[in-house]
Structure formats: structure tokens, C-alpha cells
């Protein structure tokens, strides 16, 4: 977390420059650094716990913290992996990485207050798996990570927040309020650069998204969708209508 925030600070102070003279390491499939725990298991094997117990609430907070931890790596990876893009692209995603670091820190502090730590529960690697699938195509990365998997957080956040508040965890509910507000901005960045990339390639954004979803076997999202948050994050009404129609006419993948 400290290194991510220091990276953004270096950029703001002018100690880090972004330009054509940058030297890149060749992209590889090497995983980013991560602690030995949590143990990663298939999504179906992540145990579900009741929110009526302190362990159950901690497990849910842990799951959200794991998503935010992966989101840091996703934002940094898009900066490192894809070259020759506008400087504003890299600045946007470094800012996202820093905000994801703050989200993770808030969740970790709360997890510790509950008597648990990051790594105490198993987790899955779904977010990073999609990053690997889209590692060779910035358009696919933008379409299927910020605009699909991260945008899904806009849909599910309010219900999770309500459940945590009802279980008496006001701190976790407040953290989710902060995450939702910031994630609207993160998804908006993904939408903006996705449309920019579509324009550069002469592609229709809706048609390209449908094709990329099939090609990379993206999960088919399940209704309901958070229309208000998605509109604030830069989705058009026609894109939301397409999601609704697709969800209604196909068997969703969990």
C-alpha cells in the first residue's frame, strides 16, 4: 500500500515521468507480488458464512478487501502492460491504484478491529484471471475488467451495505459508501478510455463489447443493475438496456 501511494506521490512531484522514452520490461504472465495468504480456491469453494455471526461479517469484509487488493494490481498492471497511450491514461490509472490502496487499508483496519486479518479466509482469483485473458489487448481489458467485473460492484454494493448495516456493522457500511462513491469514478475512467479506444479502432462500443464478452468468455451479468450508479459512471442508457436484455434472455454465469 505504501509503495502504491509513494508511486503516485512521485508522479505528482515530478520525480516520475511518463513519456515515449520509458523503458518497459516485456509483458509476461508472471503474477504480481502477493502475500502467501489468503489461500486461493475456485469461487464455488469459498465458504459462505452468516452475517449474524462476527465470523460471518469478518468473512464478508475479507472478501471485499480481497477484491480491493486485486484492484490495486489491476490498475498498476494496465499502466505497466500497455504502452504508447496518452499520458492522461497512465495518470488516471495510477490515481485509481492509489484509491484502491486506501479502500484496502480501510477494510484491513476494520478486519483487524474485528479480530481477524487479511489471509484468514480463503479467496478466489476471478478478477486476476480476467486480467490474464485480456493481457494482450487494451480494448478487451477496458471492456471486461473496469466495465464488467468492477462495474458489477456498482450493482451489488448497495445490497451488501444494507445487510452489513442491518447486522449492526455501521463501520463496514460506511466503508462501502466510500467505496461506491470512488468506484463510480473508476468505472467512469474505464468507460471513457474504452470509448476512446473504440473510436481509435473505428468500432461501435456496444457491438465491440458484445463480441469481446463472447471471445474472452466474460461472465454474463445478472439483474438487477444499479441504473443510477451506472449512468453516473458513464454507461449510456442503451448500454444498460443491452445488459438488461442479455440478462433476461440468457442463463447467467454466477
Image (cartoon, rainbow, N blue to C red):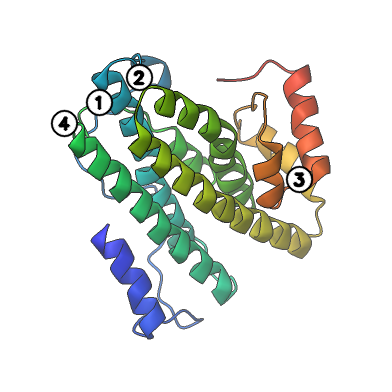
* 147 left or right of 34 in image: right
Badge 3 is on which residue?
Answer: 208
Packing grade of label 1 (10 A; few <14, some 14-19, many >=20) is many
Q: CA distance from mark 3 to mark 4?
A: 46 Å
Asked whether the residues under the numbered discs 1 and 3 touch, taking CB atoms below 8 Å apart as contact, a structural biologist would say no
Badge 3 element: helix
Q: CA distance from mark 2 to mark 1?
A: 8 Å
Residue nearest the observer in this picture, 58 or 201:
58
Badge 1 element: loop
Residue farthest along the bottom direction in this orientation: 14
Badge 2 element: loop
Badge 2 is on which residue?
Answer: 46
- Which image quarter: residue 1? bottom left
Badge 4 is on which residue?
Answer: 115
Chain-order first, disc 1 or disc 3: 1
Packing grade of label 2 (10 A; few <14, some 14-19, many >=20) is some
Badge 1 is on which residue?
Answer: 121
Asked whether the residues under the numbered discs 2 and 1 touch, taking CB atoms below 8 Å apart as contact, a structural biologist would say yes
Total residue callouts: 4
Residue farthest along the left direction in this orientation: 115
Amino acid at each position: 500500500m505504501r509503495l502504491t501511494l509513494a508511486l503516485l506521490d512521485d508522479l505528482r512531484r515530478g520525480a516520475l515521468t511518463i513519456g515515449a522514452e520509458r523503458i518497459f520490461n516485456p509483458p509476461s504472465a508472471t503474477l504480481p507480488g502477493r502475500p502467501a495468504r489468503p489461500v486461493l480456491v475456485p469461487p464455488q469453494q469459498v465458504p459462505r458464512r452468516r452475517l449474524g455471526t462476527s465470523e460471518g461479517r469478518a468473512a464478508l469484509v475479507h472478501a471485499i478487501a480481497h477484491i480491493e487488493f486485486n484492484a490495486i494490481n489491476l490498475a498498476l498492471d494496465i499502466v505497466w502492460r500497455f504502452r504508447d497511450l496518452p499520458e492522461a491514461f497512465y495518470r488516471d490509472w495510477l490515481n485509481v491504484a492509489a484509491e484502491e490502496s486506501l479502500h484496502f487499508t480501510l477494510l484491513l483496519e476494520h478486519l483487524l478491529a474485528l479480530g481477524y486479518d487479511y489471509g484468514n479466509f480463503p479467496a478466489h482469483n476471478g478478477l486476476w484471471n480476467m486480467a490474464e485473458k485480456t493481457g494482450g489487448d487494451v480494448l478487451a481489458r477496458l471492456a471486461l475488467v473496469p466495465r464488467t467485473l468492477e462495474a458489477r460492484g456498482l450493482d451489488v454494493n448497495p445490497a451488501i451495505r444494507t445487510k452489513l448495516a442491518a447486522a449492526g456493522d455501521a463501520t463496514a457500511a460506511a466503508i462501502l459508501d466510500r467505496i461506491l462513491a470512488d468506484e463510480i469514478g473508476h468505472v467512469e475512467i474505464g468507460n471513457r478510455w474504452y470509448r476512446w479506444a473504440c473510436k481509435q479502432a473505428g468500432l461501435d462500443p456496444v457491438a465491440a463489447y458484445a463480441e469481446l464478452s463472447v471471445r474472452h468468455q466474460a461472465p454474463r451479468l445478472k439483474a438487477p443493475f444499479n441504473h443510477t450508479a451506472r449512468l453516473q459512471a458513464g454507461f449510456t442508457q442503451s448500454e444498460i438496456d443491452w445488459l438488461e436484455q442479455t440478462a433476461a434472455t440468457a442463463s447467467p454465469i454466477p
